[in-house]
Amino acid sequence: MNHKHAKTLSLFFQHPISNNIQWNDLMKLLQGLDAEIEFNKNSGKTTVKLNECEIILPKQTHKFIASHKEVIELRHFFENTGYIPSTVKG
């Protein structure tokens, strides 16, 4: 994981919840972690598999991740896959 990926990952663990996480930065982070990413052309949803965990992301219609709920779901996904920034205690 490079510095840019680590910075993007840390955005998912910020308090208060960040509302400026770009979809493209998320995709680059996931690619950098060698996640399996599958785009469903019919539904527009994205399935991500990483370290035996899976998340289905809704269709993206904006440049930024659309909701706080989605950020929290991704935070839990990263926790479950073992990717937690070193700045997060716990």
Image (tube, rainbow, N blue to C red):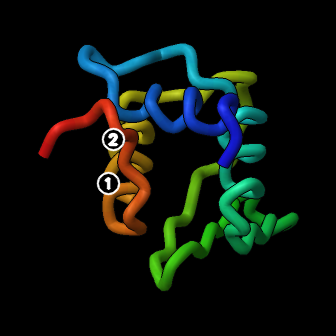
How far across and how far down the image is residue 70, in percent? 43, 41
Residue with the mark numbered 2: 72
Q: What amino acid does circle 2 point to? A: Ile
Instruction: Tell me if label 2 and label 1 are in contact, CB under 8 Å.
Output: yes
Q: Residues within 10 Å of mark 1 (few under 14, many from 20)?
A: some
Which quarter of the figure has residue 34?
bottom right
Q: Which residue is farthest left? A: 90
Residue with the mark numbered 1: 76
Taking 21 as reference, is 76 above or below it?
below
| Front residue of this view, candidates 11 and 57 | 11
Taking 27 as reference, is 8 above or below it?
above
Residue at 51%, 78% (x, y): give it: 51
C-alpha span from label 2 to label 1? 6 Å
| Front residue of this view, candidates 83 and 55 | 83
Q: Secondary structure at mark 2?
A: helix
Q: Which mark, by number, is residue 9?
A: none
Which quarter of the figure has residue 5?
top right
